Image (cartoon, rainbow, N blue to C red):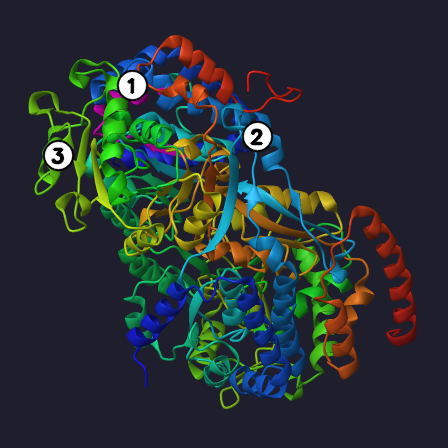
């Protein structure tokens, strides 16, 4: 079996050969990725079910369709993305061609996560391939079945010269990170992200970090309770709450909470029935360790469980749980929950809710539910987050036109659609100067004098509206 | 609390008041910055003369003209840059607002360099202010006179709390780096850059690193050699070679070497007279340490032109080295001085190979009258930026992103790129609680039927003009009403 270093050398040689540069090659690889999904839907469903008890619907939507959609988007737009962009010039450079080329970086490293194990490693890969790079994929070892599937299918469908899967745990990842990459794309936790940045600093490698945090959900003012409850419940308990953009906790007034709870209960029952443990549409916690962590949080919490609370270690099951009377210092508010537990914190005013959010780290997503557009606008304007969605949850990340990424503690950089292409590209500023008009260049050569300086000042000022091309030029 | 901590703390408190959010406020600050640059030309020029031996015309030409241009651009386009940027929607979101909202990051740190202390310290500051951030400005202590001018005068024009100038050396910089910033913009060398990235890792702070490297300059046999050499001589000896994008070394055919040397020699004389030491337009090496470093680089190479030096004045004359070998001392590090080595290669392809064996440079220069060759060289190499048939000029084009790749840096700025670099592009999806019927297909209990609809609706992406959107919306409304009626009535 190849060592990590051998894999890297092979990919670097492939990149140097220029094989990934032609559009045709990149399109072929993207089409092959599409075939991977088309040919192996059943295996994918099985693997996701084994890892997370993910219902077919969720796997299709959040692991298959979203990736396939982005592949189609890349294939349709690749030619445009690859074209150099010609840019405006000032008078002194009028006869020159100035353009920006998007160029591949080289060999990139993509480290996946376990909660959407296929999506979070293959969606970045689309951008990497489209931009003309070679890539090493390091899937999460926690979602074991998907890791195995990726190791089997990637070499089968994609060019083995240019793309490789490296499996392993923390030790293997640490060793991998000692190597030099041209970009590292990491999805995961803040603590590991710090280690990745330190490793990247050694080689001055640029990094994209898709992290998490506690995504607040403000519910305020006049609103359609039934619709809000349904959307909130859907977004929260999708993938059993194990989504980086799941609404982590709710902020609302006591009145809103009391009016909302019956609708939340109704929504949960209509989704998962009276005994959610029997529903095939609710997933499970990924590992015993995370199950322990979540059950421990429930135990330590001083809030009151009003819905759910049941759990079963054998099947790693935790019921959709809603907890009220949660305060700032509660155990549930000290870390990203990443599970099917929804704390509701009551506040007295919108200001209080906004201050609460702003006292904390910037989250990956922020949600505001209200029929009053002024409320939504206020929340949007007075907070900061990776992304923002009003009156729904999660869905903003399905739009390829929107950059998906964090800010502050929730991450740096972004991807999806063209943003993925840009993330894995170098924007090279190019200027083709004319040999002509050397007489104009004379203005800049020593010996310097004031008269030349004023001509130059005039010629290099940014283009003004309504100016015809100067006759001197 | 240390002085640095206080400054950062104050900047953060000032940022949290929200006053830098207003576009009018940002424009006022930018206009004040412009006034500063125009009103204080004398003080700026004096500082530069003491630091770098810069001539009077050198100040506006190479430091402030560019800044004025960038400030004017930012003032003119700020409203456009800061406005929400709509993006294309999916079928499910056709009636929603979908856009990207640029937002300030918070408190950024701008660490400047000593070679063009105004251009590379205030340049990034323009982007920071335009994007609505607070910015701590840390000028290079090596250009100490300029640093003092910044410290004394900037607070007279800019918001003192939002944009403090913090001067100092290594200790003060280290203290600054312990604080938490929302972005760090550093111009300098790779060694310090690694330390900065490490410090940034602690707080998960994104960084922009404008570094350097050895920028190659290839001269093809097919080119107007007289003009080429004039432009190269200008680019090389400007600021005594202390430019991150100076042509570091020349690659050319052995048959051309003598002529190249002759031409450049002629231009040195035209620019700086027979005795550059007496010429006001020729600068000095920044300090003794760099002077000694440069003199040591000469070892083992043949001087074709120049080589005169005077340690007491930190003067090194414009120098050309011939027949330089790849393993020569002068080829082992970025020169950053007025020494121009010439290495001979037999072809453009050999030049490409030579360039690709080395770290990606900040700039690549190609002199040729054959456009096809130029495009071929661009395609076969990688660098921060490229200029064909001139040197340095891409720095002055605001619509080109200025930055490095690989060892020459990460991130870029100038013009709108400077604004975006210091902004967070926040994705916004503004939905209403209406049309809840549409969502039924995504809710459990899941059925094959619902899955079919969801696959079709939820993710499919459309891109229409506004008229097409109206028509589609109307059709969709009818379509959906029919579907809801037939399949999803309670």
Q: Position of residue A371 (x, y in %)?
A: 76, 51
- Within 10 Å of disc 2 (Cα), the crowding (few <14, some 14-19, many 20+) is few
Residue ID for mark 2: B22
Mark number for residue B303? 3
C-alpha gap between disc 3 and disc 2: 58 Å
What is the secondary structure assignment of the residue under circle 2? Answer: loop
Mark 3 on the same chain as mark 1? yes
Please provide the residue range marked out in magenta: B135-155
* Residue A306 visible in the current orientation: no
C-alpha gap between disc 2 and disc 1: 28 Å
Left or right: A40 as drawn, with respect to B143: right
**Which callout, 3 or 2, points to the residue nearer the camera?**
3
Q: Position of residue A21 (x, y in %)?
A: 48, 62
Which of the marked residues, 3 or 1, is nearer the chain's N terminus?
1
* Residue A128 visible in the current orientation: yes
Tell me which residue sits at (32%, 50%) in the image: B347
Which of the marked residues, 2 or 1, is nearer the chain's N terminus?
2
Placement of the C terminus of chain A among the 4 image quadrants: top right
Placement of the N terminus of chain A among the 4 image quadrants: bottom left
Is residue A191 highlighted in magenta? no
- Within 10 Å of disc 3 (Cα), the crowding (few <14, some 14-19, many 20+) is some
- Front residue (pair B490, A321): B490
Is residue B144 highlighted in magenta? yes
Residue ID for mark 1: B149
Q: Position of residue B312 (x, y in %)?
A: 7, 21
- Front residue (pair A338, A325): A338
What is the secondary structure assignment of the residue under circle 1? Answer: helix
Mark 2 on the same chain as mark 1? yes
What is the secondary structure assignment of the residue under circle 3? Answer: strand
- Within 10 Å of disc 1 (Cα), the crowding (few <14, some 14-19, many 20+) is some
């Amino acid at each position: 079996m190849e060592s990590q270093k051998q894999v890297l050398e092979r990919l670097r040689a492939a990149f140097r050969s220029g094989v990934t540069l032609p559009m045709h090659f990149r399109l072929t690889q993207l089409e092959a990725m599409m075939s991977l999904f088309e040919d192996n839907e059943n295996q994918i469903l099985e693997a996701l079910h084994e890892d997370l008890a993910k219902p077919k619907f969720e796997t299709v939507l959040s692991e298959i369709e979203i990736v396939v959609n982005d592949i189609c988007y890349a294939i349709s737009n690749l030619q445009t993305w690859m074209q150099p962009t010609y840019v405006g010039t000032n008078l002194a450079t009028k006869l020159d061609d100035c353009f920006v080329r998007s160029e591949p970086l080289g060999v990139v490293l993509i480290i996946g996560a376990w909660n959407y194990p296929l999506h979070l490693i293959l969606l970045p890969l689309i951008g990497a391939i489209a931009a003309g790079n070679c890539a090493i994929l390091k899937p999460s070892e926690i979602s074991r079945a998907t890791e195995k599937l990726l190791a089997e299918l990637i070499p089968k469908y994609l060019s083995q010269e240019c793309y490789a899967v490296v499996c392993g745990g923390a030790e293997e990842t640490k060793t991998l990170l000692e190597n030099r990459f041209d970009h590292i794309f990491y999805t995961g936790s803040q603590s590991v992200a710090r280690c990745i940045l330190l490793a990247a600093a050694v080689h001055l490698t640029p990094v994209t970090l898709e992290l998490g945090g506690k995504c607040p959900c403000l519910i305020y003012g006049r609103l359609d309770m039934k619709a809000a409850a349904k959307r909130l419940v859907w977004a929260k308990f999708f993938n059993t709450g194990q989504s980086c953009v799941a609404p982590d906790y709710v902020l609302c007034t006591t009145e809103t909470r009391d009016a909302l709870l019956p609708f939340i209960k109704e929504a949960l029952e209509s989704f998962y029935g009276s005994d959610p443990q029997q529903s095939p549409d609710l997933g499970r916690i990924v590992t015993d360790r995370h199950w322990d962590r979540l059950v421990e949080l429930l135990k330590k919490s001083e809030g009151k469980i009003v819905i759910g609370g049941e759990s079963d270690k054998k099947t790693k099951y935790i019921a959709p749980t809603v907890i009220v009377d949660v305060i700032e210092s509660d155990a549930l508010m000290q870390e990203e929950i990443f599970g099917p537990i929804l704390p509701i914190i009551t506040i007295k005013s919108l200001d209080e809710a906004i201050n609460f959010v702003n006292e904390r780290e910037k989250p990956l997503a922020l949600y505001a539910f209200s029929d009053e557009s002024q409320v939504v606008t206020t929340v949007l304007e007075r907070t900061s987050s990776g992304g923002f969605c009003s009156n729904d949850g999660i869905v903003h990340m399905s739009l390829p036109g929107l950059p998906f990424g964090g800010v502050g503690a929730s991450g740096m950089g972004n991807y999806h659609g063209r943003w993925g292409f840009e993330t894995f590209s170098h924007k090279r500023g190019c200027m083709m100067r004319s040999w002509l008009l050397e007489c104009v260049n004379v203005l800049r050569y020593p010996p310097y004098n004031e008269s030349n300086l004023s001509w130059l000042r005039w010629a290099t000022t940014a283009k003004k509206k309504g100016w015809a091309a100067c006759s001197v030029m | 609390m240390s002085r640095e901590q206080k400054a950062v703390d104050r900047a953060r408190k000032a940022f949290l008041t929200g006053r830098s959010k207003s576009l009018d406020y940002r424009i006022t600050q930018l206009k004040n910055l412009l006034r500063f640059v125009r009103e204080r030309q004398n003080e700026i020029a004096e500082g530069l003369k003491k630091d770098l031996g810069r001539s009077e015309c050198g100040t506006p030409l190479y430091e402030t003209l560019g800044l004025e241009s960038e400030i004017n651009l930012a003032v003119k386009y700020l409203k456009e840059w800061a406005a929400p940027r709509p993006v294309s929607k999916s079928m499910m979101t056709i009636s929603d607002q979908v856009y990207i909202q640029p937002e300030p990051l918070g408190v950024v740190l701008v660490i400047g360099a000593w070679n063009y202390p105004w251009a590379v310290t205030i340049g990034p500051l323009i982007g920071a202010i335009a994007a609505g951030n607070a910015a701590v400005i840390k000028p290079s202590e090596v250009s100490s006179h300029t640093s003092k001018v910044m410290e004394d005068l900037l607070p007279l024009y800019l918001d003192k709390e939002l944009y403090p100038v913090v001067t100092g050396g290594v200790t003060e910089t280290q203290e600054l780096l312990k604080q938490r910033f929302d972005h760090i913009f550093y111009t300098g060398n790779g060694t310090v850059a690694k330390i900065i990235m490490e410090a940034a890792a602690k707080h998960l702070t994104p960084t922009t690193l404008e570094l350097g490297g050895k920028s190659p300059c290839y001269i093809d046999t097919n080119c107007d050699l007289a003009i080429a050499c004039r432009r190269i001589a200008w680019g090389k000896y400007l600021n005594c070679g202390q430019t991150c994008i100076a042509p570091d070394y020349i690659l050319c055919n052995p048959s051309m070497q003598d002529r190249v040397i002759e031409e450049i020699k002629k231009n040195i004389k035209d620019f700086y007279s027979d005795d550059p030491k007496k010429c006001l337009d020729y600068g000095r090496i920044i300090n003794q340490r760099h002077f000694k470093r440069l003199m040591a680089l000469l070892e083992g190479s043949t001087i074709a032109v120049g080589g005169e030096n005077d340690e007491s004045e930190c003067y090194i004359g414009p120098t050309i080295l011939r027949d330089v070998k790849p393993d020569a001392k002068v080829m082992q590090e970025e020169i950053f001085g007025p020494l121009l080595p010439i290495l001979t290669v037999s072809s453009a392809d050999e030049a490409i190979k030579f360039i690709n064996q080395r770290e990606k440079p900040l700039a690549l220069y190609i002199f040729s009258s054959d456009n096809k060759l130029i495009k071929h060289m661009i395609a076969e190499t990688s660098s921060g930026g490229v200029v064909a048939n001139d040197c340095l000029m891409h720095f002055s084009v605001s619509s080109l992103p200025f930055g490095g790749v690989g060892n020459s840096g990460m991130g870029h700025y100038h013009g709108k790129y400077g604004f975006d670099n210091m902004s967070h592009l926040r994705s916004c999806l503004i939905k209403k609680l209406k049309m809840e019927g549409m969502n039924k297909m995504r809710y459990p209990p899941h059925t094959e039927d619902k899955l079919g609809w969801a696959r079709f609706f939820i993710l499919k992406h459309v891109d229409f003009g506004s008229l097409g959107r109206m028509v589609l919306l109307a059709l969709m409304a009818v379509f959906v009403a029919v579907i809801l009626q037939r399949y999803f009535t309670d």
